[in-house]
Each structure stands twice: as structure tokens, then as C-alpha cells.
Amino acid sequence: QVQLAESGGGSVQAGGSLKLSCSASGYGYEINCMGWFRQAPGKERVGVAAIATADGSTVYADSVKGRFTVSQDNAKNTYLQLNRLKPEDTATYYCAVGSGRCTMVGDTVWINALHAWGQGTLVTVSS
């Protein structure tokens, strides 16, 4: 069973930056995709970025493309750099891992064979 632990959330003004971190432990299967989802109050959870552990290829939701950057090291840690933040980026951010491919569903990110979620970290962007 995989456990995920996020850190790095906080409050920032519009235009600012944050970096989120997620550490994975307790492997029981191969992790092929690590990614980030977010859930704003009263809205569904949606995928914003993901990275393949084998070759580092990335996918991004249109809403964050060019502002957010996902990275990973050795399928153990994943990071999300959030730049040029906007008030509409306010949400709880969750990391997730899976043994399937990183993919897109419409204009949002998904992880096939998703196995585990982190507990979430809150990002608040004020105008």
C-alpha cells in the first residue's frame, strides 16, 4: 500500500508562487505516473498536471499550462511549481500516483490505474 504526504500549501497574493511537494512511501506496485489534482470549494476534483516516471513526459490541464510545472525524482517524490497564481487557483491540492499512464480526459488530467491519494494541502490566492 502506498502512502502519500503533501506539503507546501499556503496563502499567497495573485501573481505569486508556491511549490508543493509530495513524498511516496510503502510501495506495493510500480508507479508509472505521478500527478496533481485540485478541488475548489463546491466543485469536483480535477487533474491539473501529471508526469510519467519512466521518461518524464508531462501533461497539463489547459487552465494551468505555462504557469505550473510538475516534476518527480525516482518515482518517490513529485513536485508542483505554481507560478503566476490567480484567485481561481484557490483549492485543496492532492497528489496521486498510479500504475497506468498519465493521460488527458477532455482538457483535464487523469492517471490510469490510480492507486493512492494524498491528504491534500490548501492553496489560497488572494486578489
Image (tube, rainbow, N blue to C red):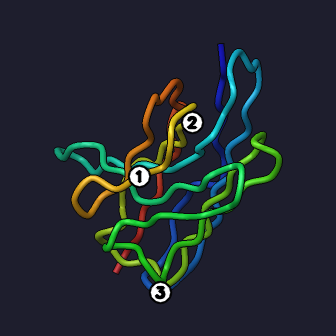
- Mark 3 residue element: loop
Left or right of 82, for residue 43: left
Left or right of 123, for residue 109: left
Residue designated by label 1: 103
Name the front one of labels 3 and 1: 1
Q: Residue furthest left?
A: 42
- Res 65 quadrant in image: bottom left
Q: Name the residue: 24% across, 47% down.
A: 41
Please, what is the three-letter code of the amino acid marked with disc 1?
Answer: Thr
Left or right of 86, for residue 102: right
Residue designated by label 3: 15
Measured Cα–Cα span from mark 2 to mark 1: 13 Å
Please, what is the three-letter code of the amino acid marked with disc 2?
Answer: Val
Name the front one of labels 2 and 1: 1
* Image position, residue 24 (x, y; %): 72, 33
Q: Name the residue: 32% across, 73% down.
A: 62
Q: Is residue 125 above or below residue 110?
A: below
Residue designated by label 2: 97
Measured Cα–Cα span from mark 3 to mark 1: 28 Å
